[in-house]
Image: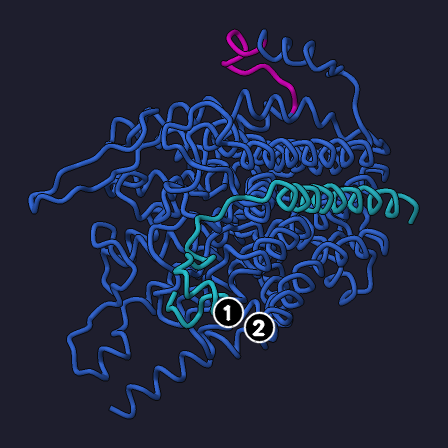
Chain colours: A blue, B cyan
Amino acid sequence: MNAQGWAEIAATIAITVALGWPLGIYLGRVWAGERTWLDPVLKPVERLVYAGCGVKPEKGQNWVAYAMSLLAFSAASFVVLYLILRFQDLLPLNPQGFAGLSPHLAFNTAVSFVTNTNWQSYVPETTVSTFSQMAGLTSHNFLSAAAGIALAAAVARAFAANRSDNLGCFWVDLTRISLYVLLPFSLVIAIAYVALGEPQSLLANVTAHTVEGGKQTIALYPTASQEAIKQLGTNGGGIFNANSAHPFENPNPITNLIEIISMNVLSYACVVAFGRLVLARKEARALVAVMALFVLGASAAIYATETQAAPALVAAHADAGVNMEGKEVRFGAPSTAVWAAATTGASDGGVNGMHDSFMPLGGGVAMFMIQLGEILPGGVGSGLYGMVVMALIAVFVAGLMVGRTPEYLGKKVEAREVKYAMLAVLILPLSILGFSAVATVLPTALAGLLNHGPHGLSEILYAYSSATGNNGSAFAGLTANTPWYNTTLGIAMLLGRFAYIVPVMAIAGSLAAKPKLPATTGTFPTDGPLFVGLLVGVILIMGGLQFFPALALGPIVEHFQALQMVAAR
Amino acid sequence: MPPSQFPSRSLRRIGAIPCSSIPARPDRLESGMFDLFYLTLGIGVFALFAAYVFGLRGV
């Protein structure tokens, strides 16, 4: 650890939050349907989309219609993507001559990209054709991200509404967010990536001749364009197996910084846009503070653990100042730490280092960030509505303590909303711990492990946490391309996305129908340090109660085993 | 595959190629059944979520 490392971490987070503010103001205008500087170019395209799809933009939807539109869109996307992946050998733009994916892998991959998870049970550069990558996967990077941001807009409208059932129109939100936010910003970032050295090519692999006379096959893809939306949409699925540790995906420290910023900035922007729409800017600031505090805390914890000497090397009397296993030398420990915190807190899943190679507690912190619900700052859109659920639980707890009916942003929080909130948050332990428990006793599942003991448990736990949290990063060490893992991880991704969204939309519908109440002297303030502290405590306690026993058997036991190894040298 | 693992003594005697060394050719019927299974599974889960929406509406 050194001052430069700490400064790098602090500056990265500060720049991300600072950029989230203007982007949030712009996003708020897009949500509200206000005029933007892109209107002259994009308004005709937007009208054309509505005309072509038969959408009436002025017609709003209640929460049931909004949720059903999302489900119908996602189900249709799943079927189309499944068919593209299965039959990529019959489709154009397959210069590599790849065969279609197996049925269980196509299921897992289709679910993964429709749910904004981007878990990859396959090696992309030897499995997926250029057409599948562009028309199948990259397009869903845009659409699944837009769907998440659309839901956040609907939740914001619920708080802004006064006795209404209108949450906006899903199809309009999906179109406007894709056209006015994701496409233009991705285009700019992709051009920057090309300028910084990332390839953008439709050619098949090229063969290089090495100095030893051998041949090396180098895969090429339209990498820069995929990389831009991969991070901006908190997708995280790499075009190469090594993800952003690969020099084509992340060639230098500048692309590394842009990638970290772009994987969190839109999630912060969603909160700022929420504050703008609900006229609760101070309350939005409090939510941003909670998110940034967690990212800072997790980055610091990972940086501290990763700059300790690796116990196995210490035991072998080897020089081991920093744990560099699985880290890129060009990025170093601080950048890897802040990336790991940002990607696991944001449901992104892209990696620039291998989490499996972290020290046990470093890997444990990354896993815990996922298990806290992907709200710190969370996926695009999903981070906001997940944080709002936690805020409702926090004001409910505060209400119990002072004996008043809790309120949040002018809406009374009653039994119905708290029940819905609990239905949403309980899906995480149900899926993560349920599937992990079965996998730890099933021979078919255990056959996929490369490590046993506590590290093996961590690998299984991380996989189901990542899938349920729609994160998509892998702890490695787990052979996941099997019918068991592809099927169960696919179901976990669906549960983590849609079994969470349905009660959130029910909360939105319930709150929208309530009157907007003015704040009184008895209203619990939700914009100050007291609320920030309460919210941090609620998130930590809920996460701790749900997952600490499992973490104690995985990374924590492994940490003590490592200490024992050092003590016994 | 070592010769002792050939499927049968008679096949070993004639030097037949073990099954595992023949490149796998997808059985279209079997593959189609799996496609049907996974598409039904995916759509079925979405149908359950739709039922969940209507279930919560009634609460």
The quadrant in which residue A14 appears is: top left
Q: Residue at x 62, y 18 (%)?
A: A34
Percent x, y for residue A135? 51, 27
The quadrant in which residue A300 appears is: bottom left
Q: Amino acid at mark 1?
A: Ala
Q: SS at mark 2?
A: helix
Q: SS at mark 1?
A: loop
Subunit bearing disc 1? A
In the image, A472 versus A320, the foreground residue is A472
Give the side of residue A470 with respect to residue B15, left or right.
right
Quarter of the image that includes the C terminus of chain A: bottom left
Which residue is tagged 2?
A443
Quarter of the image that includes the N terminus of chain A: bottom left
Instruction: Single out the residue that lies furthest toward the bottom.
Output: A568
Could you give the CA–CA distance between mark 2 and mark 1, rounded to whole angstroms?
Answer: 6 Å
Instruction: Single out the residue that lies furthest toward the left.
Output: A211
Q: Which mark is residue A493?
A: none
Percent x, y for residue A125? 37, 41
Q: Residue at x 48, y 66 (%)?
A: B10
Residue A410 in view in this figure: no
Instruction: Single out the residue that lies furthest toward the right.
Output: B58
Which residue is tagged 1?
A447
Subunit bearing disc 2? A
> Would you say residue A225 sits in the magenta stretch?
no
Q: Which residues are magenta?
A: A32-43
In the image, A291 versus A258, the foreground residue is A258
Q: Residue at x 25, y 51 (%)?
A: A331
Q: Mark 2, residues whose alpha carbon is within 10 Å: few (<14), some, or many (≥20)?
A: few
Percent x, y for residue A179? 55, 20
Residue A124 in view in this figure: yes
> Tags 2 and 1 in contact by the CB under 8 Å rule?
yes
